Image (cartoon, rainbow, N blue to C red):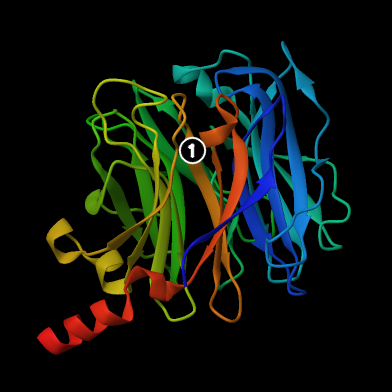
Amino acid sequence: MAIQKFSISRDPVLYEAWPDVALTPGGKMIAVFNECTHHLDRSYTRIMLTESTDRGRTWSPKRPLTPAARKPELYYNCPRITLLRDGRLVIIFDQMAWGAGGEETQTAGNYLCFSSDDGATWSEPVKTPLVGIVPDKLLELDNGRWIISAHHAQDGALAQFLRWSDDRGKSWSDPVVVAKDPAFQLCEVSLLPLGNGVIAAFLRENSGRGLDCKKTLSFDNGESWGPLIDFPLPGCHRPVAGMLQDGSILITYRFHQGGMGGFGNNTQNFFAALTDRNSVLATSRRESRARILPIDFDRSPHADLGYSGWVQFPDGEIYIVYYIVDDAVNRGQIRGCSLQPSDFSSPEQHHRVISFL
């Protein structure tokens, strides 16, 4: 099956970016994203929602989750959405002061909105004690623990933190350091639960050098974390990891090769990688492997893309949401694509591998 692409939302004026998606038990997809003046201008921001009941082939007109925020008000940044085991949906988003950067990212707040009716209505935002920007989606572990995570600058470098709750958000732990190293700029974590208290954390390294994705492991439900390990996804920005039905692991991400230049030069490619549990648990890069599949290429001179979310349908189809400029020239748009796990290797390739072995 060839990769199929679909338009989710495209605004003639506003910049749409940083989406995520959830699949309800009834088969409805709900996507959440930010609309703003521009990636580099947050004079106006608002968190928006759209829905699909036909597996992402068509989408409803977008509608707001939050009021509009206009400069000098705190602006909305990156939303993420989770389907909880009790059937509720929860969206986490960060809100920060205009112009905040560096150590000021410690002032950014993170909020939760809940829905008990498949996204028809949503609660007022509930502020959490988590500080930092670009949160990962709320993670619900097998033992019922909730984990929320974000990054901020500390001691001159970006570092990743989390808080956990064992009472469904009524109270939260003190901050836990997921990853901090003065040699790296560590951010935009994706937490992958592997069962029995094991969690893998995949991190963007943001020095602009095109370095590998960084990984660290926890064996106590996120309360402590091990050393940083290189994972063989060079230039990996905003990884989004999850487990497929067959037990393999999918990671979607923007590729940033590093070097000179910014938008239009280093943010042109969006990839998906297929790996396995042994590679995720490996303690060195040499023990890990991944098959990397190009998903999309941004042709705009102002290329800017990625920051994805994805779901898998019961029949195996994978649906990914992401933003991209491309033919919108200088405005982000929300795009979707569908693929199958088999798209990572053709039947002919599979036959050759088996024959060789």
Residue 175 can be seen, yes or no: no
Image: 15 above or below 297: above
Q: Residue at x 65, y 49 (%)?
A: 7
Q: Residues within 10 Å of mark 1 (few under 14, many from 20)?
A: many
Residue 200 can be seen, yes or no: yes
Q: Is mark 1 on a helix, strand or loop?
A: strand
Residue sitting nearer the eye, 289 or 109: 289
Residue sitting nearer the eye, 223 or 245: 245
Q: Residue at x 68, y 49 (%)?
A: 8
Q: Residue 294 sits in which quadrant? A: bottom left
Residue 300 in the image: x percent, y percent?
A: 47, 29
Residue sitting nearer the eye, 121 or 298: 298
Asked whether, in this view, residue 58 is left or right of residue 225, the answer is right
Image: 285 above or below 134: below
Tell me which amino acid carries mark 1: Leu
Q: Which residue is drawn at 26% across and 73% down?
A: 278
Asked whether, in this view, residue 167 is left or right of residue 355, the answer is right
Residue 308 in the image: x percent, y percent?
A: 52, 49
Q: Residue at x 58, y 65 (%)?
A: 311
Residue 22 in the image: x percent, y percent?
A: 66, 60
| Image quadrant in which the C terminus is located | bottom left
- Residue hosting label 1: 305
Residue sitting nearer the eye, 214 or 253: 253
Image: 44 above or below 179: above
